[in-house]
Amino acid sequence: MLRAEGLSRAFGGRVAVADVSFAVEAGEVVGFLGPNGAGKTTTMRMLAGLLTPDRGRARAPERLGFLPEVFAGYDALAVGRYLGFMATMKSANRAEVDRCLSAAGAKDLARRPLGRLSKGQRQRVGFAQALLGPPEAYILDEPTQGFDPAQAVEARELVRGLAAAGAAVLVSTHLLAEAAAMCDRVVVIVKGRVVAEERPGEVADLEARFLRLVGRSELG
């Protein structure tokens, strides 16, 4: 459902992503791991159709839920009105807005202006927006940033539920424990290149392998 086929992208002569290829199938959650500046966000934006690759091809279904690393929205609008507008763009109805707000733990924010929300609250609204559709696939860039531990657990359960319902889910995270708990597979990217693709296994094992891969690539 989601496919990166030899994706490459440079900015001002600096290569951000180089020949990245991987796939996310229906019914699975794939973690996208890498250090800061590794190319995760650039790759995800190409997959979402927000950035044109210099080379390669990005494949995604038309009904795609996307949560950016930094969710913006319109600060002057109340959450409910903003999501109502986005629902219209996605041919969804008001009941769908209420469902997504509840699923994202943001129902109590419906009348609050976006500009008065905390980082974690804005992220929950962004999550609700991504759920509108409902989409066939999701691209979630650091979806639990700003969440407290309880909210993070709920978000992980929600992501697993999306895959169980048949969606393909690509999620980036800096938290290896989160990847181990949530993902069926992980793709590791360092310096714009995929260096590993494997099952996460136990948290300690994933951490050791990740650090070894990152260290080896950084030194190389």
Image (spheres, rainbow, N blue to C red):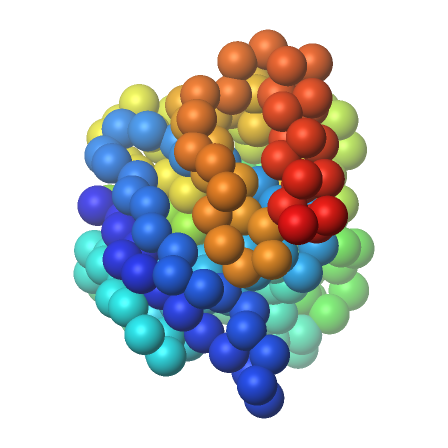
Q: Nearer the viewer, residue 151 or 116?
A: 151
Q: Nearer the viewer, residue 22 or 115?
A: 22
Q: Residue at 61% x, 63% y: name it.
A: 71
| Whether residue 44 is visible | yes
Q: Residue at 55% x, 73% y: name it.
A: 15
Q: Is the residue 18 above or below the residue 176 in the image?
A: below
Residue 51: percent from the left, percent from the top?
Answer: 41, 76
Q: Quadrant of residue 149?
A: top right
Q: Residue at 54% x, 48% y: name it.
A: 189
Q: Residue at 45% x, 59% y: name it.
A: 44
| Whether residue 86 is visible | no
Q: Nearer the viewer, residue 90 or 149?
A: 149
Residue 208: percent from the left, percent from the top?
Answer: 69, 21
Q: Quadrant of residue 52?
A: bottom left
Which residue in the rendered view is the most extreme toward the top?
202
Residue 62: percent from the left, percent from the top?
Answer: 20, 61
Residue 108: percent from the left, percent from the top?
Answer: 64, 44
Q: With 52 as the anchor, is 141 left or right in this view?
A: right
**Number of numbered labels in the structure image:** 0
Q: Is the residue 14 above or below the residue 46 in the image?
A: below
- Quarter of the image that includes the N terminus: top left
Which residue in the rendered view is the most extreme toward the front?
220
Q: Nearer the viewer, residue 193 or 132?
A: 193
Q: With 62 as the anchor, is 177 left or right in this view?
A: right
